[in-house]
Image (cartoon, rainbow, N blue to C red):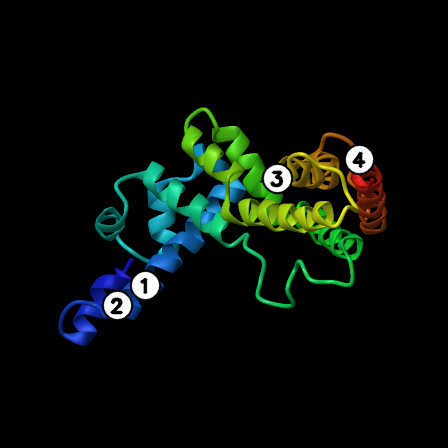
Amino acid sequence: MTDILEAASIRLGGRPSKEEAERLGEKILDVATGLFLTDGYEKTSIEAVARGAGISKRTFYHRFQDKGALFAAVVHRIIENLRPAAGPPLYEGENAEQVLRRLASLMVHAAVMPSILALQRLILAEARRFPELAAAMAQEAATVEAIKGIAALLEGEVNIGRMKLTNTEFAALQFMQLVVAIPQRRALGLGTPMTQNEREAWANDATTLFLNGCRV
Protein backbone atom coordinates (compact mmCIF):
# COMPACT_ATOMS: atom_id res chain seq x y z
CA MET A 1 0.00 0.00 0.00
CA THR A 2 1.21 3.49 -0.81
CA ASP A 3 3.08 5.04 2.06
CA ILE A 4 1.40 8.34 2.98
CA LEU A 5 4.62 9.82 4.27
CA GLU A 6 6.53 8.99 1.09
CA ALA A 7 3.67 10.30 -1.05
CA ALA A 8 3.75 13.58 0.85
CA SER A 9 7.50 13.85 0.29
CA ILE A 10 7.08 13.34 -3.46
CA ARG A 11 4.25 15.84 -3.67
CA LEU A 12 6.16 18.52 -1.81
CA GLY A 13 9.50 17.70 -3.39
CA GLY A 14 11.10 16.97 -0.03
CA ARG A 15 10.31 16.23 3.58
CA PRO A 16 6.65 16.33 4.66
CA SER A 17 5.51 19.47 6.44
CA LYS A 18 5.23 19.56 10.22
CA GLU A 19 1.44 19.62 9.90
CA GLU A 20 1.39 16.55 7.66
CA ALA A 21 3.76 14.70 9.96
CA GLU A 22 1.52 15.52 12.94
CA ARG A 23 -1.60 14.40 11.06
CA LEU A 24 0.07 11.14 10.16
CA GLY A 25 1.12 10.59 13.77
CA GLU A 26 -2.46 11.15 14.93
CA LYS A 27 -3.76 8.77 12.27
CA ILE A 28 -1.39 6.03 13.41
CA LEU A 29 -2.50 6.51 17.01
CA ASP A 30 -6.17 6.56 15.99
CA VAL A 31 -5.81 3.25 14.16
CA ALA A 32 -3.76 1.70 16.96
CA THR A 33 -6.23 2.87 19.62
CA GLY A 34 -9.12 1.18 17.83
CA LEU A 35 -7.19 -2.06 17.40
CA PHE A 36 -5.82 -2.20 20.95
CA LEU A 37 -9.18 -1.45 22.56
CA THR A 38 -11.05 -3.90 20.32
CA ASP A 39 -8.57 -6.77 19.89
CA GLY A 40 -6.21 -6.34 22.85
CA TYR A 41 -2.44 -6.06 22.91
CA GLU A 42 -1.51 -9.57 21.83
CA LYS A 43 -3.80 -9.68 18.78
CA THR A 44 -2.83 -6.24 17.52
CA SER A 45 0.06 -6.43 15.07
CA ILE A 46 2.32 -3.74 13.70
CA GLU A 47 1.32 -4.93 10.23
CA ALA A 48 -2.36 -4.28 10.99
CA VAL A 49 -1.62 -0.81 12.35
CA ALA A 50 0.53 0.09 9.32
CA ARG A 51 -2.12 -1.24 6.95
CA GLY A 52 -4.89 0.67 8.67
CA ALA A 53 -2.88 3.90 8.67
CA GLY A 54 -1.81 3.50 5.05
CA ILE A 55 1.91 3.46 5.78
CA SER A 56 4.83 1.09 5.38
CA LYS A 57 6.43 -0.72 8.30
CA ARG A 58 9.54 1.35 7.62
CA THR A 59 7.60 4.54 8.33
CA PHE A 60 6.13 2.95 11.45
CA TYR A 61 9.60 2.17 12.82
CA HIS A 62 10.72 5.73 12.12
CA ARG A 63 8.19 6.79 14.74
CA PHE A 64 7.95 3.92 17.23
CA GLN A 65 10.64 1.56 18.46
CA ASP A 66 8.24 -1.37 18.74
CA LYS A 67 4.66 -2.34 19.59
CA GLY A 68 5.26 -1.68 23.27
CA ALA A 69 6.25 1.93 22.55
CA LEU A 70 3.15 2.35 20.40
CA PHE A 71 0.96 0.93 23.16
CA ALA A 72 2.47 3.36 25.66
CA ALA A 73 1.81 6.28 23.32
CA VAL A 74 -1.81 5.18 22.85
CA VAL A 75 -2.45 4.85 26.58
CA HIS A 76 -0.84 8.19 27.42
CA ARG A 77 -2.89 9.94 24.73
CA ILE A 78 -6.13 8.43 26.04
CA ILE A 79 -5.19 9.49 29.56
CA GLU A 80 -4.53 13.06 28.42
CA ASN A 81 -7.91 13.12 26.67
CA LEU A 82 -9.63 12.31 29.97
CA ARG A 83 -9.25 15.95 30.99
CA PRO A 84 -12.68 17.62 31.10
CA ALA A 85 -13.57 19.84 28.15
CA ALA A 86 -13.45 23.57 28.61
CA GLY A 87 -16.67 24.91 30.03
CA PRO A 88 -18.14 26.44 33.19
CA PRO A 89 -15.76 26.23 36.19
CA LEU A 90 -16.21 22.83 37.79
CA TYR A 91 -15.72 23.99 41.35
CA GLU A 92 -17.94 27.08 41.37
CA GLY A 93 -21.47 27.10 42.75
CA GLU A 94 -23.75 28.51 45.39
CA ASN A 95 -22.33 26.14 48.00
CA ALA A 96 -20.11 23.08 48.43
CA GLU A 97 -23.04 20.68 48.38
CA GLN A 98 -24.21 21.94 45.01
CA VAL A 99 -20.71 21.63 43.56
CA LEU A 100 -20.15 18.12 44.94
CA ARG A 101 -23.49 16.88 43.61
CA ARG A 102 -22.68 18.25 40.16
CA LEU A 103 -19.19 16.70 40.24
CA ALA A 104 -20.59 13.35 41.39
CA SER A 105 -23.03 13.29 38.48
CA LEU A 106 -20.27 14.10 35.98
CA MET A 107 -17.88 11.52 37.43
CA VAL A 108 -20.29 8.61 37.65
CA HIS A 109 -21.40 9.01 34.04
CA ALA A 110 -17.82 9.52 32.75
CA ALA A 111 -16.65 6.39 34.60
CA VAL A 112 -18.88 4.12 32.51
CA MET A 113 -18.15 5.63 29.09
CA PRO A 114 -17.31 2.78 26.65
CA SER A 115 -13.85 4.22 25.90
CA ILE A 116 -13.01 4.46 29.61
CA LEU A 117 -14.23 0.92 30.30
CA ALA A 118 -12.26 -0.41 27.32
CA LEU A 119 -9.12 1.32 28.59
CA GLN A 120 -9.67 -0.08 32.09
CA ARG A 121 -9.96 -3.62 30.71
CA LEU A 122 -6.87 -3.17 28.57
CA ILE A 123 -4.76 -1.77 31.42
CA LEU A 124 -5.89 -4.53 33.78
CA ALA A 125 -5.02 -7.17 31.19
CA GLU A 126 -1.57 -5.69 30.55
CA ALA A 127 -0.71 -4.37 34.05
CA ARG A 128 1.97 -7.02 34.62
CA ARG A 129 3.60 -6.39 31.23
CA PHE A 130 3.39 -2.59 31.51
CA PRO A 131 3.28 -1.67 35.22
CA GLU A 132 4.29 1.90 34.45
CA LEU A 133 1.14 2.37 32.38
CA ALA A 134 -1.07 1.04 35.15
CA ALA A 135 0.60 3.52 37.49
CA ALA A 136 0.08 6.32 34.98
CA MET A 137 -3.61 5.45 34.74
CA ALA A 138 -3.92 5.61 38.52
CA GLN A 139 -2.19 8.99 38.58
CA GLU A 140 -3.58 10.46 35.37
CA ALA A 141 -3.75 14.23 35.25
CA ALA A 142 -7.53 14.61 35.31
CA THR A 143 -7.81 12.51 38.48
CA VAL A 144 -4.99 14.36 40.23
CA GLU A 145 -6.52 17.71 39.29
CA ALA A 146 -9.96 16.60 40.46
CA ILE A 147 -8.60 15.49 43.84
CA LYS A 148 -6.84 18.83 44.30
CA GLY A 149 -9.95 20.77 43.27
CA ILE A 150 -12.26 18.85 45.60
CA ALA A 151 -9.71 19.07 48.41
CA ALA A 152 -9.57 22.86 48.03
CA LEU A 153 -13.36 23.00 48.16
CA LEU A 154 -13.40 20.91 51.33
CA GLU A 155 -10.62 23.01 52.84
CA GLY A 156 -12.80 26.06 52.42
CA GLU A 157 -15.62 24.32 54.29
CA VAL A 158 -13.23 23.36 57.09
CA ASN A 159 -11.96 26.92 57.38
CA ILE A 160 -15.45 28.33 57.94
CA GLY A 161 -16.34 25.58 60.40
CA ARG A 162 -18.86 23.65 58.30
CA MET A 163 -16.77 20.49 58.07
CA LYS A 164 -14.35 18.69 60.33
CA LEU A 165 -11.56 17.03 58.34
CA THR A 166 -7.89 16.49 59.11
CA ASN A 167 -6.80 15.50 55.58
CA THR A 168 -8.85 17.06 52.77
CA GLU A 169 -6.94 15.33 49.94
CA PHE A 170 -7.66 11.94 51.52
CA ALA A 171 -11.32 12.93 51.89
CA ALA A 172 -11.45 14.04 48.24
CA LEU A 173 -10.06 10.68 47.10
CA GLN A 174 -12.61 8.84 49.23
CA PHE A 175 -15.40 10.94 47.73
CA MET A 176 -14.32 9.98 44.21
CA GLN A 177 -14.06 6.30 45.10
CA LEU A 178 -17.43 6.35 46.83
CA VAL A 179 -19.07 7.83 43.74
CA VAL A 180 -17.29 5.90 41.00
CA ALA A 181 -16.05 2.50 42.19
CA ILE A 182 -19.23 0.40 42.34
CA PRO A 183 -20.93 1.80 39.21
CA GLN A 184 -17.75 1.22 37.23
CA ARG A 185 -17.22 -2.30 38.60
CA ARG A 186 -20.77 -3.20 37.62
CA ALA A 187 -20.28 -1.68 34.16
CA LEU A 188 -17.17 -3.84 33.76
CA GLY A 189 -19.27 -6.95 34.29
CA LEU A 190 -18.92 -7.45 38.03
CA GLY A 191 -22.66 -7.21 38.59
CA THR A 192 -25.61 -5.78 36.69
CA PRO A 193 -24.77 -2.45 35.01
CA MET A 194 -26.69 0.51 36.37
CA THR A 195 -29.14 2.44 34.23
CA GLN A 196 -28.65 6.17 33.78
CA ASN A 197 -31.32 6.90 36.38
CA GLU A 198 -29.71 4.46 38.80
CA ARG A 199 -26.33 6.12 38.33
CA GLU A 200 -27.83 9.54 38.99
CA ALA A 201 -29.52 8.28 42.16
CA TRP A 202 -26.24 6.64 43.22
CA ALA A 203 -24.33 9.90 42.74
CA ASN A 204 -26.85 11.79 44.86
CA ASP A 205 -26.95 9.18 47.62
CA ALA A 206 -23.14 8.87 47.69
CA THR A 207 -22.81 12.64 48.00
CA THR A 208 -25.33 12.75 50.82
CA LEU A 209 -23.49 9.99 52.68
CA PHE A 210 -20.16 11.76 52.21
CA LEU A 211 -21.49 15.11 53.39
CA ASN A 212 -23.13 13.55 56.45
CA GLY A 213 -19.79 12.07 57.41
CA CYS A 214 -17.90 15.37 57.02
CA ARG A 215 -20.19 17.97 58.50
CA VAL A 216 -19.74 19.25 62.01
The disc placed on residue 107 is none
Q: CA distance from mark 4 to mark 1?
A: 42 Å
Q: Position of residue 125 (x, y in %)?
A: 52, 29
Disc 4: which residue = 192
Q: Which residue is found at the position 55% from the left and 52% from the top? A: 82
Query: Could you tell me if the residues under marks 3 and 1 are in contact, i.e. CB atoms within 8 Å?
Result: no
Q: Which one is in front, 52 or 99?
A: 99
Q: Residue furthest left?
A: 14
Judge whether 70 appears above or below 8 on screen.
above
Q: CA distance from mark 3 to mark 1?
A: 38 Å
Q: Which residue is found at the position 21% from the left and 68% from the top? A: 16
Q: CA distance from mark 2 to mark 1?
A: 6 Å
| Residue type of the residue flagged with mark 2 | Lys
Whether residue 203 sits left or right of residue 159 in the image: it is right
Q: Position of residue 83 (x, y in %)?
A: 54, 55
Disc 3: which residue = 169
The disc placed on residue 18 is 2
Dot 4 or dot 2: first in sequence order is 2
Q: Position of residue 134 (x, y in %)?
A: 48, 33
Q: Which residue is found at the position 47% from the left and 42% from the top? A: 36
Disc 1: which residue = 22
Q: CA distance from mark 3 to mark 4?
A: 31 Å
Q: Which one is in front, 195 or 90?
A: 90
Q: Position of residue 100 (x, y in %)?
A: 74, 51
Whether residue 38 sits left or right of residue 178 in the image: it is left
Callout 1 secondary element = helix
| Residue type of the residue flagged with mark 4 | Thr
Residue 206 in which image quadrant: top right
Q: Nearer the viewer, mark 4 or mark 2?
A: 2
